[in-house]
């Protein structure tokens, strides 16, 4: 019985190691992190809009040498 368990344990160990190696290669080879972070940020901005009754505007700013994005959140507009 011990011999059978050793083979089974070795097989399980090899199978798990191969599976982990495959998953690691899949994750390292894909660019999932940036889109996921952007989606989380977008959801947070939507919640801010909802909580404050605000309006968010997404703006791309450019000058002669650089380009970047900006999120402007406007809320609490009143007449003076």
Image: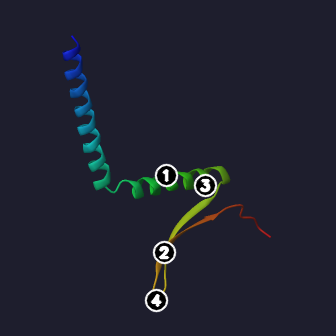
The residue located at (45%, 86%) in the rendering is 65
Crowding at label 4, few (<14), some or many (≥20) Cα neighbours within 10 Å?
few
Looking at the image, how many numbered discs can be counted on the residues?
A: 4
Query: Mark 3 or 4 closer to N-term?
Result: 3
Crowding at label 3, few (<14), some or many (≥20) Cα neighbours within 10 Å?
some
Residue 36 placement (x, y as % from top left): 42, 53
**SS class of the residue under badge 4?**
loop
**SS class of the residue under badge 1?**
helix
Check whether the beta carbons of the residues at disc 1 and disc 2 lie within 8 A of each other: no
Check whether the beta carbons of the residues at disc 3 and disc 1 lie within 8 A of each other: no
Check whether the beta carbons of the residues at disc 1 and disc 4 lie within 8 A of each other: no
Tell which residue pokes out farthest to the front in this image.
2
Q: For mark 1, what is the residue?
A: 40
Q: For mark 3, what is the residue?
A: 49
The residue located at (61%, 50%) in the rendering is 50
Query: Mark 1 or 2 closer to N-term?
Result: 1
Question: How is this picture coloured?
Answer: rainbow
Q: For mark 2, what is the residue?
A: 68
> Which one is in front, 19 or 11?
11
The tag on residue 69 is none
Work out how far the residue at label 1 is from the one at label 2, CA to CA, in angstroms.
19 Å
Crowding at label 1, few (<14), some or many (≥20) Cα neighbours within 10 Å?
few
Query: Mark 3 or 1 closer to N-term?
Result: 1
For residue 31, which quarter of the picture? Answer: bottom left
**SS class of the residue under badge 3?**
helix
Work out how far the residue at label 3 is from the one at label 1, CA to CA, in angstroms.
14 Å
Work out how far the residue at label 2 is from the one at label 4, CA to CA, in angstroms.
12 Å
Q: For mark 4, what is the residue?
A: 64
Q: Is residue 28 left or right of residue 45?
A: left
The residue located at (60%, 61%) in the rendering is 55
Between disc 3 and disc 1, the foreground one is 1
Residue 76 placement (x, y as % from top left): 72, 61
């Amino acid at each position: 019985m011990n011999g059978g368990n050793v083979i089974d344990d070795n097989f399980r160990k090899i199978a798990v190691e191969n599976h982990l190696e495959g998953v690691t290669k899949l994750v390292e080879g894909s660019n999932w992190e940036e889109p996921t972070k952007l989606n989380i940020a977008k959801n947070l901005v939507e919640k801010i809009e909802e909580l404050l009754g605000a309006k968010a505007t997404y703006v791309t700013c450019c000058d002669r040498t650089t380009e970047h994005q900006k999120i402007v959140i406007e809320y609490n507009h009143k007449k003076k």
